[in-house]
Amino acid sequence: MKLYRIQANYKNVYLDETVEAENDRAALESFSASYDSGQITEKEGPGFHDPNFLLITFEEVGEDVTKVNIGETSAGVKMGTASVGTG
């Protein structure tokens, strides 16, 4: 089983839920079923984009998605390699 975080924002309604599923399709179906059954609580959207535009983010996350470790990096730490503008 994998853990997924799915967020949706439409008409100033924001949904944010983590679901456990075997694959991507099962995660989306579980998210939809949870919303239809009223298990997901609607929150007020952030209001920074067109409310008529459906915005969905979908990501596979680790089990420790709710834990924050501020001590891992400091400001200004370079991560990875630039993909454009090098050379």
Image (tube, helix red, strand yellow):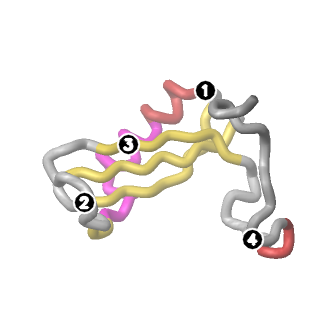
**Which disc, if any, is residue 13?**
2
Mark 4 or mark 3: which comes first in sequence? 3
Name the spot of residue 14 as percent of width and height, x first. Answer: 32, 59
**Which disc, if any, is residue 23?**
1
Secondary structure beneath label 2 = strand
- The reply to whether discs 4 and 2 touch (Cβ–Cβ < 8 Å) is no
**Which disc, if any, is residue 75?**
4
Mark 1 or mark 4: which comes first in sequence? 1
User: Does residue 37 show up magenta in the picture?
Assistant: yes
- The reply to whether discs 4 and 3 touch (Cβ–Cβ < 8 Å) is no
Reading the image, the residue beneath label 3 is 56
Secondary structure beneath label 4 = loop
Mark 2 or mark 1: which comes first in sequence? 2
- Residue 20 found in image quarter: top right
**Residue 24 in the figure: left or right of residue 79:** left
- Label 4 to label 2, Cα distance in Å? 33 Å
Name the spot of residue 2 as percent of width and height, x first. Answer: 69, 37
User: Does residue 58 show up magenta in the picture?
Assistant: no
Tag 1: amino acid: Asn
